[in-house]
Image (tube, helix red, strand yellow):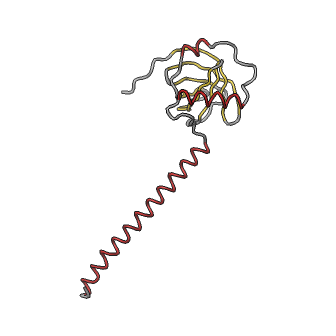
Amino acid sequence: MHRREQRVEIVLDAQMRLDLGWTHVWIHNLSAHGMLLWASHPPRPGSYIELRKAAETIISRVVWVREKYFGVRTEALLDIRTLLRGTAKPPAAPPSAGATRTATSQLQAETSPKAGHVPTPLSRLAEFAAITVATAAGAAVTALLTYDFLAGVFAVINRRLTGSG
């Protein structure tokens, strides 16, 4: 049976960045590796989001969505105490794109086991294409080897049946 992590029930506001820009979200609970969030337009399951709460930047993947609530799993272990302490009013405007990239890159380098890698739709597509090409090449090589082997076997059988071998 899957054991759930202990959750901290709270209501905190934060900023979320998706492909189309920044939006407001509410954090309803926290655990060591995830959060329950609410947004007026929640992202699709499988989407990667960037969440800003005070000075904290959190990269996570959307696991499920039910109406306007959604659950995310974070790449790094959440420091719940720091998030709870960072209840200061969020900045009036979302951070600049350059500052966001710098903060995101730094967070990933420090905490991610795959330092610096956050899959994007384009990188996931490239990975899928590479795996598809490699699989097709492997299948083609296997088919050619099987054809050569069977052609040799049938040639021997044919020679024996016709008496020429």
Q: Which percent across, then down, holds residue 30?
A: 53, 19
Q: In which quarter of the image is the C terminus?
A: bottom left
Vertical relation: 131 (above or below) 107: below
Q: Quadrant of the N terminus?
A: top left
In front of the other: 124 or 8: 124
Q: Which percent across, then down, holds residue 46?
A: 55, 37
Q: Which percent across, then down, holds residue 103?
A: 64, 27
Give the left or right position of residue 102, taking residue 75 as reference: right
Q: Which percent across, then down, holds residue 4?
A: 43, 22
What count of labels does the image hold?
Answer: 0
What is the quadrant of residue 15 in the picture?
top right
Vertical relation: 130 (above or below) 64: below
In front of the other: 108 or 150: 108
Vertical relation: 50 (above or below) 80: below
- Residue occupying the point 53% across, 49% down: 128
Vertical relation: 107 (above or below) 139: above
Give the left or right position of residue 163, taking residue 129 as reference: left
- Residue occupying the point 41% across, 65% down: 143
Q: Residue extending furthest right?
A: 92
- Residue occupying the point 71% across, 31% down: 98
